[in-house]
Image (cartoon, rainbow, N blue to C red):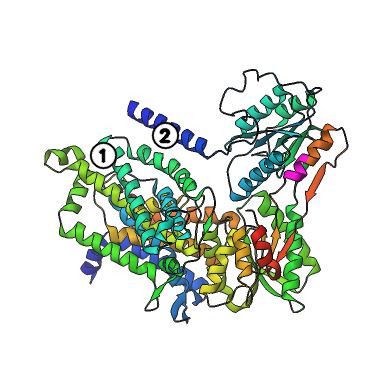
């Protein structure tokens, strides 16, 4: 029994050390470490009146994907560029809600001007957001929202997944032209907000494009390996009937492209592709002529976030929902876009 | 004839093979025969059966290593993470992020990735055989930490490469058959020769039945266990290479995610007891193909993603029931009982 316990402890330590290594250093002051006791009173900060800087605390989810890493890097980059006007406090919650709540509480204790939050889950935020509201600190949801009352947060900045789906559908219609054709859909992880929105948007928009027909959709779990396997199966079932593929993210599409090549078809020509996100690898594929269109879900939200935060500090009104536009990139310009891709 | 059939059913791989044939047959009937269709595309065979073989190859390789681990009464749940590590190392070397002096050589990448897997296996074996930590706990350390190590190697990114040589590991064909199948055949042949032609297999079974007694008969229990875990790590690394070659990238978050459970399931369907003892590698290979063919079935039948997991669970339950001796006896008793009653009523 002791042995097991010792091993468990050792494992926990190893995990803690490793995940510790992974966390990105914050650009400004040492971030309030979520694992340390946040209950301790935070060191006295200069009061708002004498500090002209915009003090922003941001509770990030952690490192879960390349997309989120790009978002974190952009926030820190933007803050570092404006180091004279922005005091950015960054907390990495390592995918745990309690760490995010601790971080928000310590931000409240410090008396920051604005709190930013990318909620790791949708529920359980009422208590801590009420605290922030009572302290008079506006809260910005970044890229993800939460199920709370409207008055508990100032604004939600993020992409509109349904808009992305609708845009993707329009692009597919353009690619397939007047005669249209049959399209297969690679769905994201079942139940994920992004997958639900991107499917609904695409399906809704089909009403305007009767020439396109979605003949099958299967989940590729947002991964390359599953995307490839599902596409292999689609190709066996429908073969040359398939004129286009719509994937809820680029990684599934990159897997599907391999499957299409193996089946003896030319991706980008025989079978048109539209995928969402905008990772660098899909731009490489587009430049190589193996993919057609990408609808970008931009993680570079630093400017949006900090300008909104500045407005909130100045007491200006901001929209309760700020939609980050879904930019479209096509194969024709991919070679030029490629060097500018940051993620 | 009947005695021959009886003899055949005695083989451990008989029931798993029947299950596999049944799944394929059902698919064939539902699809109206197109499931069996094999065409030639670009000079290689192309069809669903080929897909099952190729996509199942990594699971077959994992199952080869896992079978012996389970036969000693142990378990290795770190194989998925080891796959991620091996893919990460191979892709980073080819990409030039790691060891730029190797010049992106595929041979160097593959060798070092396999060595890394071997090292992971040796670490697991050390914890289990020497430090005597319970296998599930010992390998859980690497299961959790392994993905972190892989992330460190790739710096948290999906490393995409474009190397025809590396891609050949998954996408290559020899005589129209996918290259991974040759890897499986090679690995399994060597393993079987070693296990069957030496006393090694017997030692493994003996340890699985009673490791204390084995020790007293003079079997070096610790060393054999150590070797088996090391071998399992090596197999996991090989599987990782096949997976990452298939997508031309190292996807540390998702490579081999939860595959340890598929591996254990494959061995279990093959009829090797998780409590240790008798084992059969050919039966595990068939088990791996059964697991893969369930996935292919889901895709081929176009089952809605929302109910995929439930469908898989039901199929696995049915397979387990088919293989359960107690369940079969229960059925025959019930059947015999009814017959008896009918006779009495008459």
Residue B111 is situated, as x and y percent measured from the top left of the image, at 34, 58
Within 10 Å of the Cα at label 1, are there few (<14), some (14-19), or many (20+) other Cα atoms?
A: many
For the residue pair A124 and A84, the one nearer the viewer reads as A84
Confirm whether the magenta stretch covers residue A264.
no
Confirm whether the magenta stretch covers residue A303.
yes
The quarter of the image holding the C terminus of chain B is bottom left
In this rendering, does residue B212 appear at all? Answer: yes
Q: Please give left or right for residue A63 compared with residue A109 in the image.
A: left
Q: Please give left or right for residue B256 compared with residue B18 in the image.
A: right
Gap in angstroms between the C-alphas marked 1 and 2: 18 Å
In this rendering, does residue B344 appear at all? Answer: no
User: SS for tag 2?
Assistant: helix
Write the start and end of the magenta stretch as one range. Answer: A301-306
Residue for badge 2: A11
Residue for badge 1: B129
For the residue pair B66 and B325, the one nearer the viewer reads as B66
User: SS for tag 1?
Assistant: helix
What secondary structure is the stretch in magenta mostly built from? helix
């Amino acid at each position: 029994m002791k042995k097991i316990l010792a091993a468990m402890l050792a494992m926990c330590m190893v995990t803690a050390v490793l995940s510790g290594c992974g966390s990105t250093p914050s650009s400004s002051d040492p971030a309030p470490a979520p694992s340390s006791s946040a209950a301790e009173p935070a060191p006295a900060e200069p009061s708002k009146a004498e500090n002209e800087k915009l003090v922003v605390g941001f509770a990030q989810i952690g490192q879960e994907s390349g997309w989120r890493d790009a978002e974190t890097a952009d926030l820190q980059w933007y803050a570092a560029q404006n180091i004279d006007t922005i005091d950015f406090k960054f907390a990495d919650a390592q995918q745990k809600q309690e760490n995010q709540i601790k971080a928000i509480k310590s931000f409240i204790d410090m008396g920051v001007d604005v709190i930013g939050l990318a909620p790791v889950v949708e529920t359980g935020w009422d208590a801590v957001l009420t605290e922030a509201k009572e302290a008079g600190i506006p809260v910005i949801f970044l890229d993800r929202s939460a199920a709370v009352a409207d008055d508990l947060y100032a604004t939600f900045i993020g992409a509109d997944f349904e808009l992305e789906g609708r845009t993707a559908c329009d692009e597919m219609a353009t690619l397939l032209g007047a005669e249209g054709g049959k399209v297969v859909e690679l769905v994201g992880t079942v139940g994920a907000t992004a997958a639900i929105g991107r499917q609904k948007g695409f399906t809704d928009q089909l009403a305007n494009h009767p020439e396109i027909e979605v003949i099958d959709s299967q989940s590729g779990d947002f991964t390359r390996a599953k995307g490839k396997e599902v596409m292999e199966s689609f190709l066996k079932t429908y073969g040359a009937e398939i004129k286009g593929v719509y994937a809820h993210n680029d990684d599934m599409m990159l897997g599907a492209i391999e499957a299409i090549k193996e089946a003896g078809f030319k991706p980008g020509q025989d079978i048109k592709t539209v995928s969402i996100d905008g990772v660098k690898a899909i731009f490489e594929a587009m430049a190589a002529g193996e993919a057609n269109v990408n609808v970008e879900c931009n993680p570079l939200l630093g400017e949006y976030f900090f300008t909104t935060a500045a407005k909130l500090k100045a007491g200006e009104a901001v929209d309760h929902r700020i939609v980050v536009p879904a930019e479209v990139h096509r194969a024709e310009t991919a070679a030029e876009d490629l060097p500018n891709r940051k993620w | 004839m009947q005695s021959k059939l009886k003899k055949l059913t005695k083989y451990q791989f008989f029931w798993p093979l029947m299950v596999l044939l049944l799944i394929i047959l059902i698919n064939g009937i539902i699809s109206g025969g197109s499931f069996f269709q094999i065409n030639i595309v670009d000079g290689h065979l192309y069809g669903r059966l080929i897909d099952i073989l190729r996509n199942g190859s990594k699971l077959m390789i994992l199952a080869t290593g896992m079978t012996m681990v389970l036969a000693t009464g142990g378990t290795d749940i770190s194989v998925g993470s080891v796959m991620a590590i091996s893919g990460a190392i191979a892709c980073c070397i080819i990409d030039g992020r790691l060891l730029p002096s190797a010049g992106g050589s595929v041979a160097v990448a593959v060798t070092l990735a396999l060595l890394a897997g071997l090292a992971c296996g040796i670490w697991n074996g050390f914890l289990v055989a020497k430090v005597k930590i319970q296998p599930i706990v010992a390998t859980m350390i690497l299961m959790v930490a392994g993905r972190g190590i892989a992330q460190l190697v790739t710096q948290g990114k999906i490393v995409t490469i474009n190397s025809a040589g590396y891609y050949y590991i998954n996408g290559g064909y020899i005589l129209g058959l996918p290259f991974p199948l040759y890897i499986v055949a090679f690995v399994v042949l060597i393993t079987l020769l070693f296990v069957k032609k030496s006393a090694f297999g017997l030692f493994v079974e003996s340890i699985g039945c009673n490791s204390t007694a084995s020790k007293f008969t003079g079997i070096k229990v610790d060393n054999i266990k150590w070797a088996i875990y090391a071998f399992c790590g090596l197999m996991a690394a090989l599987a990782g290479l096949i997976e990452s070659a298939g997508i031309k990238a190292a996807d540390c978050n998702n490579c081999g995610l939860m595959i340890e459970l598929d591996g254990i399931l494959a061995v279990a369907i093959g009829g090797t007891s998780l409590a240790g003892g008798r084992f059969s590698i050919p039966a595990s290979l068939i088990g791996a193909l059964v697991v893969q063919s369930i996935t292919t079935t889901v895709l081929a039948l176009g089952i809605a993603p929302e109910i995929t997991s439930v469908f898989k669970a039901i199929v696995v339950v049915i397979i387990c029931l088919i293989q359960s001796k107690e369940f079969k006896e229960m059925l025959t008793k019930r059947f015999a009982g009814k017959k008896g009653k009918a006779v009495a009523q008459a």
